[in-house]
Amino acid sequence: MEQKITMTDPRKSDYFYEEAIKTLRTNIQFMGKEIKTILFTSCYPNEGKSDILFQLAKEIGKTGKKVLVVDADIRKSVYVKRYRVNQSVNGLSQYLSGQIDKQWIEYITNFENVSMIFAGPMAPNPSELLEEGIFAELLQEKRRQYDYVLIDTPPMMNIIDAAVVAKKCDGAVMVIESELVSYRMAQKVQSQLQKSGCRILGAVLNKVDTKREKYYSYYSKYSK
């Protein structure tokens, strides 16, 4: 059953940000047609992971590809509030816990070719719900129905949810906030993803202050 929902994007137009998202879209598309279920995670909260994922979904949708955004951050979802959803919605946690059928959790948004599965109410056992075979089956079904399934997961610093979801995905993207995340922490998250068996597609460096002098230096002067 098709359910429609209106979402309002609060982001103001930013040429450089939009061009970076288009570059990310192109890079994702060059990964090959078998890379369809893609997890997004970060080290810490508020690194911009959810915004980058949603903007990417919109850009892919504009090319005519069908995209499904799955909010698997059952612990602390941001989508309903950030995108000003004014109606009651069902979500992933309700389906995984057996409260509702899957036909009631998928919404067609007002953005071209973009559909959405919201996280639903916070559950006391998110990692256990995401570990269930029913979630893997849902992703496989949506993988067949959509060109891309983009999955938003919690930060990985002290939570295993993203690693659990990664086992069920074709690839993963790390979002890293400039000058917040240490090299050691980024390596730790990368290692956790690798242990899950999920292919790491790459990383997105976010919140870069391009006005600072060091970002205009030569490539040979860039630090690790």
Image (cartoon, grey):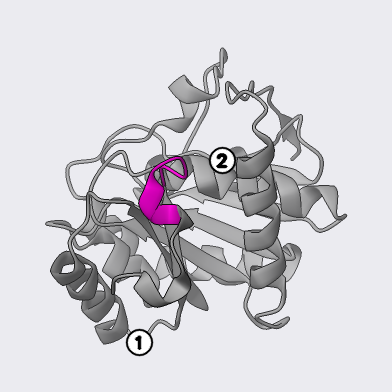
Residue 41 is left or right of residue 28, and the answer is: left
User: Is 93 located above or below residue 157 in the figure?
Assistant: above
Classified by dominant secondary structure, the portion drawn in magenta counts as: loop
The amino acid sitting under disc 1 is: Gly
Residue found at the far right of this picture? 64
Q: Identify the secondary structure beneath mark 1.
A: loop
N-term mark: 1 or 2: 2
Q: Residue at x 47, y 31 (%)?
A: 79
Q: Which residue is mark 1?
A: 197
Residue 10 appearing in the image: yes
In the image, the segment drawn in magenta is 207-215
Residue 60 is left or right of residue 219, and the answer is: right
Residue found at the far top of this picture? 86
Tell me how far mark 1 sits from mark 2, CA to CA.
28 Å
Q: Which residue is mark 2?
A: 105
Q: Position of residue 68 (x, y in %)?
A: 65, 52
